[in-house]
Image (spheres, coloured by chain):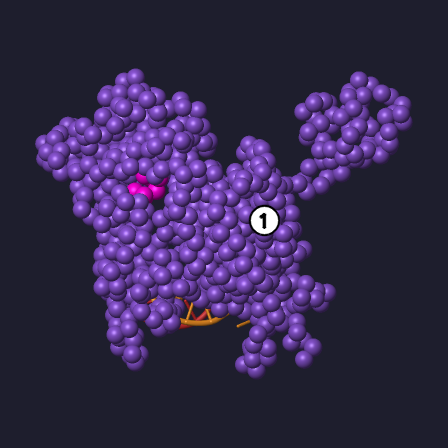
Chain colours: A purple, B red, C orange
Amino acid sequence: MESAHRHLEVAVALPVHGTFTYRLPAGYSPDGVAARRVLVPFGKRRVTGYVLGAARDDGALEAEGREIKEIADVLDDGPLFPPSMVPFFRWISDYYHHPVGEVIRTALPGGLNCYERQVLSIDEAGGPEGRRDPSGLRREVLACLRQGDCTAPELGKRLGRPVPETLIRSMEACGWIRRRREMRGGRTRPKTALFVQVLLSPADDRRPTPARRRLWDILADTPEAAVADLVRVVPSARSVLRRMERDGLVRLASRAVYRDPFGETVHPDSPPELTGEQAAAVDAIRSGLERGFTRFLLTGVTGGGKTEIYLRAAAIALERGLNALVLVPEIALISQTERRFRARFGDRIALLHSGLSAGERLDQWRRIRSGDARIVVGARSAVFAPFDRVGLVVVDEEHDPSYKQDSGLRYNGRDLAVLRAQLSQCPVVLGTATPSVQSLFQAESGRYIRLSIRRRIADRRLPEIEIVDLRETRDLRGTAKYLTPVLLEAVSETLARQEQALLFLNRRGFASYPVCSSCGQAMRCRHCDITLTLHQNANAYRCHYCGHTRPGSSPCPACGSTAIWPMGLGTEKLEEAMGKHFPEARIARMDRDTTAAKGRLVGILKALKRREIDILVGTQMVAKGHDFRHVTLVGIVCADLSLSFPDFRAGERTFQLLAQVAGRAGRGDRPGRVVLQTFNPEHFSIQAAKAQDPDAFYREEIRHREALGYPPFSRMVQFRITAKDPRKAAAAAEELGERCRRLLAGSPGSPSAVRVLGPLEAPLARIAGHHRWQLLLIGRRPGLLHRIVGQLAAPHQAGSDPRGARIAVDVDPFFMM
DNA sequence: AGCACGCCGACT
DNA sequence: GTCGGCGTGCTC
């Protein structure tokens, strides 16, 4: 029985379902290796694995007569995450039908994974290169290897065609080439810096040169300093200090330091007095902290002071010796929330988001792991922060679609945040001005406690929203369709008052629908089923899905004419048109094109704050959380763009986007005005946005959802089938659909409980040369739905055949296109 | 993911 | 007849 304790459950970092049992080598204690990476023999090679804990099926494998292999190496000195997170990872793996090793790999900071690769080289001992002259491909392989060792795939790339494994093996057998295994990766290391430690005093210095004197001055009040900092004052510090070390005056030592992801410093703030509503919300969360797992939906008008509530709640959790997890949408990080938390909590904050380099990310991870950081502020992946004792989870802007990851492990950060709170038995606060239908439904049914903020700070009034019916100008030509008299008048009044205007248009580029003037064909992407967008600044047509680019001077592919009409309005054209109407105004644009370079987004926001911009034109980027004090006019140029999406959440997303954009107006002490232009003035999403009333939107929307059996009255799972060959995609989709229907027919009770839609060609039938099909499963009982999905997905988990079709599972899908 | 095994067409 | 292509299945 003694050996059974030394059997460990290991998840390998490969797309393989299930976990494996390995034996711990002598010299390690089973408890000591939990949550560390190990190198394990797996099939013919060795791979990275994660130790989940003691093996659960003790003895069963041996009873089967299976060999249990020994762990080859333990790769970490300490745990990468608290072992208490293992159930969290397992749950995610089950729910999203994703291998647990891949789940952990997704959770960990990148750059930690090792893998083994096989390097080929010429076998020098193999004698003369064949009595029979090597022919064809063999000769090419030898010539290539003579230039340097490489792996088989690299060899194929260099020769322009794949080199078959069998050929390599036969050449190996002939003694021409040799194969060796090499470990690669896992190279992101903690950063170290040189520190100087004062041992003696200036009086002991026998050679007080000028440089030394200055160093002594600096070191007078710090017993220890970073050499890099000293070099900035005394350029020769490095060599001078070395000599001082030889004289026994100081000691130089290398120490681990953290790379600093915080751009500028933030000055500490002091907590403001809470309004009555804020205090009530904080009290409710405090009592939640005593009760354990409690879910709060904090809804409140923009400018109502939700962030202050998060700050107070986090402070309470910290006082109790617990940690806090704060999730924010990706874009908001560079703005309010992160700065506010840093101002209040200083270096007890760690930051996790996509803007960090691999090294910075690893350092933040280590700070969380070590307990240096007690609060994590970050985007969706921060839900995996390696905290042991989570006392509070916050999801700001919980409705934001960026919480859903749409590749690899397709998880929803908001949902996992709630799960993490449940597993940690702590409160979770979902905050937003425009709650998701799902969260309001949970609040209605009593699972979430609703906390409402109805009044803005200092009783600032909500902006007035005026609807402009675009049908009245639809027959006008060009931009006149959208630059209505009401909008232009409003902008001109705003400029006259020296205030700022924000124009929102959810489409970037110059012309989104370039049409040939002689044959009437639209310019389409060669690889996708959508029209190209003309980007005038870049003088190029671009595909917004695959990135394909054509010169702006390209002729019509159908008839060769060079006269292309730039139809369709994008932010670039809007910016230009506004420039013509208001030649004196300073106009800027904020979209993915103008903010691609690092720092540009912050630059635009700062310019706006300093009032160096009069009119800002932008996409939904402008909707998110920024506080523009002098913006008193928001123009929503065309509210309908997101309404026509083939997605049951189109209405919800439209309402949220419009209400969020509208909330940008009048955040200072002047009242705001919003001009909302639409072709569907009567639509309830538009009407609810005008009224700034999420509950009114909800009441209408929930009726539709119930009638159609859509979430939250059911759960959805989408299978996405893609292949380069359109027939393969179709065939794989049909086959999957068949299997699905057979499975349902064969399991009692399920045919009626699970609806199958499709397989159908996706609304975007082709992206980047891949043909796309989808199969949608809708079930009222999550358990049953997931059992079916599990059976359906299992054979496809190990698989992306580049020639065949690929099947991806998306649980609770967000993007239905 | 890789690497084995196993089954069908074009060559020494 | 074998060499060499790629579909299926397994890895403690």
Q: Is residue A695 visible?
A: yes
The quadrant holding residue A158 is: top left
Q: Nearer the viewer, residue A618 or A635?
A: A635
Chain letter of disc 1 in the image:
A
Where is residue A722? Give x, y as percent. 30, 56
Residue A75 higher or lower than A566, as above or below = below
Helix, strand or loop for disc 1: helix
Instruction: Say which residue appears at 19% left-offset and 36% top-offset.
Output: A468
Q: Where is mark 1, residue-wise?
A: A315
Residue A146 relative to residue A540: left or right = right
Residue A409 higher or lower than A358, as above or below = below
Instruction: Say which residue appears at 30% left-offset and 80% top-offset.
Output: A748
Task: Residue type at mark 1: give it.
Answer: Ala
Magenta extent: A657-663
Which secondary structure is most common in the magenta stretch? helix
Q: Residue furthest bottom?
A: A63
Q: Nearer the viewer, residue A459 or A205?
A: A459
Residue A286 higher or lower than A547, as above or below = below
Instruction: Say which residue appears at 67% left-offset and 24% top-offset.
Output: A232
Instruction: Say which residue appears at 17% left-offset and 41% top-offset.
Output: A679
Residue A518 relative to residue A685: left or right = left
Count of marks, rendered view: 1
Q: Is residue A178 visible?
A: no
Residue A208 higher or lower than A526, as above or below = above
Where is residue A110? Give x, y as percent. 53, 49
Image quadrant holding the N terminus of chain A, namely bottom right
Q: Is residue A362 magenta?
A: no
Where is residue A266? Give x, y as percent. 56, 34
Q: Nearer the viewer, residue A505 or A700?
A: A700
